[in-house]
Amino acid sequence: MAMTVQRSAILPIPRSHFLFVIRIRECNETSEKLSKIPKINFTKLFINGDFVEAVSIWDREMGSECNETSEKLSKIPKINFTKLFINGDFVEAVSGKTFDTIDPRTGEVIARIAEGDKEDIDLAVKAARHAFDHGKWPRMSGFERGRIMMKFADLIDEHVDELAGLDAIDAGKLFIPLKMGEIPAVADLFRYFAGAADKIHGETLKMSRELQGYTLLEPIGVAGLIIPWNFPSTMFSLKVAPALAAGCTMVVKPAEQTPLSALYYAHLAKLAGIPDGVLNVVTGFGHTAGAAISSHMDIDKVSFTGSTEVGRLIMQAAATSNLKHISLELGGKSPFIIFDDADVNTAVDLALNAVFYNKAKNNPTGEICVAGSRVFVQEGIYDEFVKQAVKRTKAWIVGDPFDSHVHQGPQVDKKQFERILYYIEQGKKEGATLLTGGNTCGEKGYYIEPTIFADVKDDMVIAKEEIFGPVMSLMKFKTVDEVIERANNTIYGLACGIVTNDLNLSNRVSRSIRAGVIWINCYFAFDRDCPYGGYKMSGFGRDNGLHALHKYLQVKSVVTPIYNSPWL
Amino acid sequence: MAKHGNGNSEYLEKIPDVKFTKLFINGEFVDSISGKTFETVDPRTGEVITLVAEGDKEDVDLAVKAARKAFDHGTWPRMSGFERGRIMNKFADLIEQNLEQLAALDTIDGGKLFSLGKEVDIPSASSMLRYYAGAADKIHGETLKMSMELQGYTLLEPVGVVGLIIPWNFPSLLFFIKAAPALAAGCTMVIKPAEQRPVSALFYAHLAKQAGIPDGVLNVINGFGPTAGAAISSHMDIDKVSFTGSTEVGRLIMQAAATSNLKQVSLELGGKSPLIVFDDADVNKAVELALLAVLYNKGEICCAGSRVYVQEGIYEEFEKKIAEKAKSWVVGDPFDPHVQQGPQVDKEQFEKILYYIEQGKKEGGTILTGGKALDKKGYYIEPTIFTDVKEEMTVVSDEIFGPVMSLMKFKTVEEAIERANNTKYGLAAGIVTEDLNIANRVSRSIRAGTIWINCYFALDRGCPFGGYKMSGFGKDKGMQALYKFLQVKAVVTPIYNSPWL
């Protein structure tokens, strides 16, 4: 069905590219599974200033396929912002260079984005430095900062369709969950930290002598925020909101794969009244713009979410430049432990979500650092679990993220797509049993079937390394001791899932697992108020909660002698 | 009062037996695997005191293995915080019982004033243990108010095996500034003392065992930075390194952490701290404070107040009085109770300070007083004050770690703030004024981790200490230091039928 959509003035996308169909593939095995998928009726959508009728959902037939409709592709929002945002203005890169951002559904170019490099970072840092050293942002009251952040959040809510559309075409994320879940959560995160901005309290100290001492929590200065591509909007807010609340100024570098929404947020920040220079966005690549941030002598702190490899580079650059503070939220290979007393159906649901999420559900594809990719199932229910997990996985629908029936969209880019396929091959070579999936899906776009390996050993590559894709390693265990040991047998320590209703068991295992987040009978139970970050090589520093705010503050102790105090 | 006095030979006799010279691994004193040793030297004479086992990578590996086992399977992180606290208090008792011997070890090993060691350093070390002993059973996570039907709480858990790399300037105090909060947190540890000051740490290890700290919890590896220190920083089984020392070495440690297992790092590095004296100050008191700020511990202290800014109204008087006072300062044998300043820690440091004094002269600074070494054996340097200096000169911009002050004049508060902040460091700052508004304004404006108003070196167990900017990150002392050795775990479950969120 046809739909009029304003397209980017910068890069018109030829109509022919909308006509893209994935070849029929038997992704869905049984009809009975399919019938359980609720029919979701779209309401009208607000796109580019017009209410438009959403694409209707065609009824899925029995034995329906992993596939795609061309019409949904037309929901591309207008792309207004493609330049760097420095000191309150959208500007070209100093070099004049641009790079393409790609629609992972088609592999086609969406827009050309200004490519920032060292010189652009220098300009952005200069603006941020000035805004911090002399501007009003860190000097106004926390209450006032909070008011402006609230305004910013309102604007995000008002532009939810545009923002959801940008992340959908840029990262292959499902449109509806973006619109209903992720983008509103971004606005709420700004509200959470807005409410914290006027509650930044130092302490008075009880000293051992006649001294009066207190601590001040002061903004750390100019922050460099380096954001990954898997949750472009959420990650932007996780870093930017607490830094703003603390009174820092910042240079944000979005991932080169997903630069669009960050520029839109910058535009909204300006509209909300965040002063020029406080929030700068420089799009570009890691080894140029990212490296310039990490090694900059005038950036006081870098907060990074991404791969362990890049985390290392950032920490090294900080060490060799100005010893800036860093916090790293890195990779994971999180265990998901299911005990005999679990309800198998619930456990299967949780386990599938734990690994296929991000491009399944909110952002389906397993492209999430906390993916529960090592699933340990106790022997009493193992066989039943395998049976159900396979059945359920085969009913999983892979396709265009704009389609509301779809469980899982494409992987973010070609590199990631190929990396996942490489790991699947490795799993086969090392002798793991491929229970389901293992192939690409469709002829165009970066679609991969949800894949489950059984008979996986702890030392196989697929059980050790972060794949960042829809690949589950399924393992059987006997005793609690055994599973604690095996679950901890990893260089990572980001998260862990536990499924049991036994209080003693859940207490013991949650204390024993060396990971930053433990989800019992749930997974991905993220919350604004709940600190999130890794143990071991998953990094250090916390996002979310007041711990994240404290990351952007530093402690100053102030001491004076006291005379004739009635008590110490 | 004596002039640049010098040590009386009788004090040289007070050399204690050095009982412990080997590595302390898993509760035992052992030779290094290589069998190598190195000399530790008495800075009063430049003579060798004893040979100390020289640990290297293999020895660090053994120590980490012991610490790993003690953490992963041992009783220390599994006993209650209260019990850990009891053992730490016992440890503190033992330190006090061996006070004289410990103070003497730090004196012969580093030229620290014996009386100061006995009255301040060693008692502070045991008090530090007691402070954190009392905190060990007060490690509280939080319950969370979630936005959905979820029950969430945080646990603060020990970070694991920690590497503690200690500088030579306060061997006893810094040993416990690092080890006490790590012990309270339930961590196990490998400690590398400075190669210049290896002996008291071994004595502490011995006392730790006597106090009942389980084998493997506290290991001491003596040795050198490029070998033992590097092995700690790059070790794949150490979860955290806490370091106090130079900015250069801080960089190396952070790089090693980045390229190995991404261990957490906290760094307490150099400083070039300003002391700002305003017109309303009592000049006599200000002079005393300024001298203390730069000459305490021979200037071998990272938070030394080595840039002194005096407002123009009292500058002339201040300059005159400080010169007089500095000239009567007594430099000599640290065992002599009349002595105010002992020798610098070693030859390298001694020569580095003299180099900076030469640089200061070359760059056009005027020597108000001092400016050379004492004409006697040992590493003694006169208290030295430069005037006519500017922020861009090396004597003003670089950390000297010796008794060298840069004295400067300023007019306005704005000027003082700007010049005081004109440094890559941000460890501490001193302010002398009775004016509340100036004190408030300046203490907020200076980018430094500690502000002392009308006092200096007012360090306190309960008061966080650590840098802004290139002075590092992570705090020592206070509850902040305990949190450094803890990590946050969030635990979340769904809740059903809760009456409220």
Image (cartoon, coloured by chain):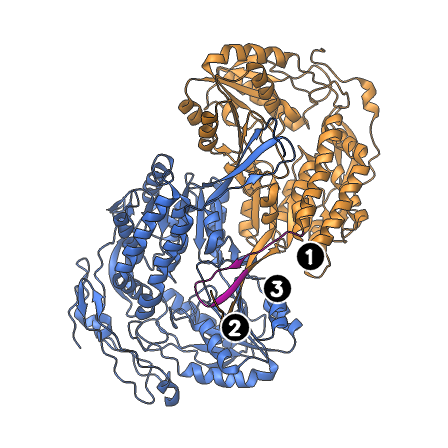
Chain colours: A blue, B orange
Q: Residue A439's spot in the image, x, y percent?
A: 40, 78
Is residue B25 visible in the rendered image? The answer is: yes
Q: Nearer the viewer, residue A337 or B412?
A: B412
Which class describes the residues within 10 Å of circle 1: few (<14), some (14-19), or many (20+)?
many
Tally of numbered discs: 3
Question: Given the image, on which type of amino acid does mark 2 rest?
Answer: Asn
In the image: residue A366, left or right of residue B184: left
Q: Residue furthest front?
A: A566
Is residue B32 visible in the rendered image? The answer is: no
Image point 50% across, 43% down: which residue? Answer: A319
Q: Residue A542's spot in the image, x, y percent?
A: 49, 54
Image point 62% across, 16% down: which residue? Answer: B372
Element at label 3? helix
Residue B77, disc: 1
Question: Given the image, on which type of amino acid does mark 3 rest?
Answer: Arg
Above or below A7: residue B14: above
Residue A511, disc: 3
Element at label 1? loop
Above or below B454: residue A516: below
Residue that mark 2 sits on:
A521
Q: Range of the magenta residues?
A: B137-153
Question: Given the image, on which type of amino acid does mark 1 rest?
Answer: Pro
Splitting the image into 4 quarters, where does residue B147 fall?
Answer: bottom left
Per the model, the C-alpha gap separating discs 3 and 2 is 15 Å
Element at label 2? loop
Which class describes the residues within 10 Å of circle 2: few (<14), some (14-19), or many (20+)?
many
**Which chain contains the residue that carries disc 1?**
B
